[in-house]
Amino acid sequence: MTHATILQQGTIHCFPAGLRDQKGDLVNAEVSAVVYDGKRLILASDKPIPGEQRSAVFALPMTSQGPDDSELEYFTTPLIKQAVKYEDFALTADGRHVLATTGFDRIDDVSHDLNAYNHLLIWPLGEPDKVQVVDPDPRDGVAGSLELRRKLDHAIGFPYYKIEGLAAIPGERGDGLLVFGIREQGQSHDDFAYVSRLVGAHYEISDQGNLVLIDEMHDLYAFEPGDHESVRFECGLSSLEYDPYHARLYLLTSFETEQDGVPHIGGYLWVMGLEDLPSGRQPTLVTTAEGSPLEFEHKAEGLAVLDHERLFVAYDNDRHMHLGSVDERDERHACEAPYSLLHVS
């Protein structure tokens, strides 16, 4: 069994308090992606953060006292600012590049107005200014990873889907296996099912530093969180994270529902060995030190491995403002994103 203990909780100030968008509405921090590059946490909101010198992607040091948002740095390279609705980050299997995916949950093939929602980006570790689009449309002036989208369409087999997980793990070919985690699939954005499904393909890093898929995108794995007796609410996959220290994969699932008029948000953490992927073995639900299921009180959306025994969890509570046990205050400011630091054993 894998156990987790909360070492620290708090909030990150993602932008100045009171920031408003062009419509005059208060901007809300909705952190949905996080990765650790060995020194800093790189985070992203799945909603734009307005301002010429800001973007939805930013980094801050991870110190012995926790994340330090006093040294927050926005990634303002045009390609990074161009993409919308970031959902997950990953490091390549060799740890030398950062990957960032959007949700791929909407497209307009005629106008291309929604291409910003269809991006997989790559940049060398520590060099976001060298960002590139993975598997772009071959037509000049057409933005986005549209060739990749066509491959995802074929592998997933539904007209609507949402990507919320991304991981790169050691594979049998090339430089590794690129894994996408699907949270929603169905006929449309209002006719879908929550799922925890993985598709992927092997990849190589080219001489130009871009990621190239070298075989066909295909189904890798799926499981139903609700089959576990301790899962109280319907969940969908919300993040993937490769743990190179223990050759395993973490899967984060989250829920946002209502029962008897009462809203419920939260999530669960699962772990599996890489050898369990081809066998289809069910992942293990991470528990507390006492052996009870670890159920997050907030909507767990981002996950990062920090070292051999620590994980960082970022929460995207959307418009839910309560802080619960994260802080003595009842509610967070709109600019704050709650987080937890876990010790895993």
Image: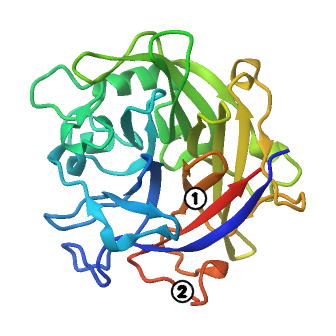
Residue 38, given in percent of the width and then of the height, sits at 44, 47
Q: Quadrant of the N terminus?
A: top right
Residue 78, given in percent of the width and then of the height, sits at 15, 47
Kindly identify which residue carries mark 1: 313
Amino acid residing under circle 2: Glu
Per the model, the C-alpha gap separating discs 1 and 2 is 19 Å
Residue 114 falls left or right of residue 46: left
Graded by Cα atoms within 10 Å as few (under 14), some (14 to 19) or many (20 or more), the crowding at tag 2 reads: some
Residue 188, given in percent of the width and then of the height, sits at 48, 42
Name the mark on residue 201: none
Q: Residue at x 42, y 17 (%)?
A: 203
Vertical position of residue 123 compared to residue 29: above or below: above
Residue 288, given in percent of the width and then of the height, sits at 82, 60
- Disc nearest the viewer among 1 and 2: 1
- Tell me the element at label 2: loop
Vertical position of residue 58 compared to residue 159: above or below: below
Locate residue 76: give its quadrant. Answer: bottom left
Residue 115 falls left or right of residue 337: left
Q: Residue at x 30, y 27 (%)?
A: 134
Q: Residue furthest left?
A: 140
Q: Residue at x 36, y 51 (%)?
A: 85
Kindly identify which residue carries mark 2: 331
Rendered image coloring scheme: rainbow
- Tell me the element at label 1: strand
Residue 146 falls left or right of residue 337: left
Vertical position of residue 176 compared to residue 283: above or below: above
Locate residue 124: give its quadrant. Answer: top left
